Image (cartoon, helix red, strand yellow):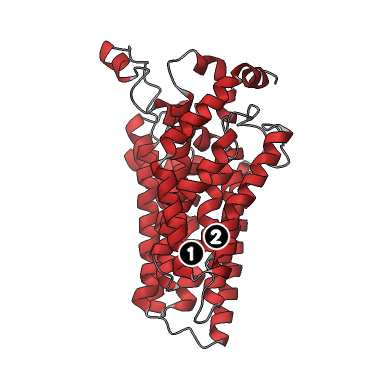
Amino acid sequence: MKLGAIRLLSRLRFRQFFRQKNKGLVGKIIIIAYFWFLELMFFFMIREEGGTGFPPLLLAFIFLGAIVPDALIKIIFEHDQTVMDPFIRTRPISQSSWDRFQSVSQFWRASNLAMPLIMAPACLLFMPIGWGLATLLVLYLFSVFGGFLVMLFKHRGNYPLEKRVSAKTARSFRPGGGHHIFGIQSRSFLRSKRLKTSVFLLTGVFFFQFISQGLGSIGHFDSIFLCFTILYPSIVLAQWGMSIEANSFSAIWTKPVSISRLLTDKFLFSALIGVIAALITLPFCVWFKIPLYAPLAYALFNTGVGILFILVDAYNCMPFDLFGKTFFNYQGSASTFKASAFLAILVVMLPPLILPFILPEWVTLLILAACGLAGLLLHRPYFRWVERKFLNNRYKYMEKYLSI
């Protein structure tokens, strides 16, 4: 009966899959085709230069590094599918059979097949056939295991009854403690397709430029695209300032929460995004023989200078439409704030762009790291100063938050 239930659910799932328009699958196919084109282009470029004889073990280690971004993408983009939809609930399917089917279906889910398919040309072209197939098998198993863990992580249960709020639970959410404000940043980012697209779109372009330039260089590597890959996702997220909070600022204002605390949590979340970007680039830095202190210096500069500079007038904003259309949507920032944010981004990117032409690379990285470390140490008094600027004209900005 258990196997019969799994077969029935598999048949129903595939029937729904072929009858419905699956725009997500079309997007995955386009992404896979794009990566295949890049991998073929890199292979022919390297073969012309006679550089295809890489050690298989090193290539296997580098290719297995794709597990990290694959897991992050699943955590951010994957929707929870562990609750039965109304159609399945009309069938005589037990909850245990449904849970078992959810686990087994991880072996053929499109999100778990995407990463091995993306890496297939690289594994088969750059490595001996045995090494390539073994690496692909390991990538596939890790992708399935990652999908299973994400399923458990995002499991919402079977619509359980709401729990009563006990005194202990109420104390855990006291106004002055915990990290519930930090949760505003993470939940808003994970739920808004518009925010994620604004962060990942150009970051992906910089990342691919970083890889292509690293593969094409001989004896010297210009790490400017490495810098942009780390800086851009953080500062483009910070450029919106308090636009997310502006949607419910009247409620936030009634809480005993300081503006400096709100900005600190926004600062920490943006810094976390930059650190994740730096970690993703580490395997490629090893491959391209870039010093590992380079992404560290850029991450420090991004945290201590870039994000702080962008958040200097974070309160001068309009409510951000989290669930509006992704492209050609200019709602969420006044023209003055948009111009100031754009100029701030240009100013932040100038030092890593200009200093390498004046100073040696190691001196440039040392200066960037030192400036970032200084900003990181001074971020608390800095945000208290920004808070005082806001409080001096708070009614003007609060009126702007309510204007839409």
Image coordinates for residue 212, horizontal then vertical, percent: 56, 70
**Residue 136 appearing in the image:** no
Q: Which label number is shown at residue 352?
A: 2
Asked whether the residues under the numbered discs 1 and 2 touch, taking CB atoms below 8 Å apart as contact, a structural biologist would say: yes
Looking at the rendered structure, the secondary structure element under dot 2 is helix
Q: Quadrant of the N terminus?
A: top left
Could you tell whether 316 is left or right of 56 in the image?
Answer: right
Q: Quadrant of the C terminus?
A: top right
Image coordinates for residue 156, horizontal then vertical, percent: 40, 29
Q: Earlier in the sequence, mark 1 or mark 2?
A: 2
Hey, which residue is sitting farthest left in the picture? 168
Looking at the rendered structure, the secondary structure element under dot 1 is helix
Task: Give above or below for 398 relative to 347.
Answer: above
Q: Which label number is shown at residue 364?
A: 1
Which amino acid, mark 2?
A: Pro
- Residue at the image point whose x is 51% and y is 78% from the top: 220
Q: CA distance from mark 1 to mark 2?
A: 8 Å
Disc 2 packing (10 Å; few <14; some 14–19; many ≥20): many
Viewer-proximal residue among 284 and 256: 256
Q: Which label number is shown at residue 280?
A: none
Could you tell whether 87 is left or right of 176 in the image?
Answer: right
Task: Give above or below for 55 relative to 115.
Answer: below
Image coordinates for residue 150, horizontal then vertical, percent: 39, 43
Which amino acid, mark 1?
A: Thr
- Residue at the image point whose x is 40% and y is 36% from the top: 154
Q: Quadrant of residue 224?
A: bottom right
**Residue 320 appearing in the image:** yes
Task: Give above or below for 21 relative to 61.
Answer: above
Viewer-proximal residue among 81 and 61: 61
Image coordinates for residue 19, horizontal then vertical, percent: 62, 42
Q: Quadrant of residue 216?
A: bottom right
